[in-house]
Amino acid sequence: MTGAVTLLSSGLDSTVAFKQALDTFDNVICLTFDYGQRAA
């Protein structure tokens, strides 16, 4: 496979999805957004 883009929210689900993408694809890009809000 070629590559994937993963969206990270710092939660467990997105962390596991990122690890699965690393194991599956040759190239993985992580994308996250900083809205300036405090964590819940």
Image (tube, grey):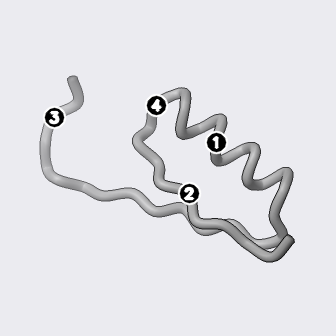
> Answer yes or no: do the residues labelled 1 and 2 have beta carbons within 8 Å?
yes
Q: Which residue lies under the disc numbered 3?
A: 38
Instruction: Using the numbered discs, state the Cα–Cα distance from disc 4 to disc 3 in whole angstroms.
Output: 14 Å
For image coordinates 54% across by 27% down, the residue present is 12
Instruction: Using the numbered discs, state the Cα–Cα distance from disc 4 to disc 2 in whole angstroms.
Output: 13 Å
Q: Disc 4 or 2, which lies upstream in sequence?
A: 2
The 10 Å Cα crowd at callout 4, few under 14, some 14 to 19, many 20 or more, is few
Q: Which mark is residue 32?
A: none
Give amino acid for label 2: Thr
Q: Position of residue 4 (x, y in %)?
A: 66, 67
For image coordinates 47% across by 48% down, the residue present is 8
Q: Which mark is residue 6?
A: 2
Label 2: state its secondary structure. Answer: strand
Q: Nearer the viewer, mark 2 or mark 3?
A: 2
Q: Which residue lies under the disc numbered 4?
A: 11
Q: Which residue lies under the disc numbered 1?
A: 17
The answer to which of 12 and 39 lies nearer the viewer is: 12
Give amino acid for label 1: Ala
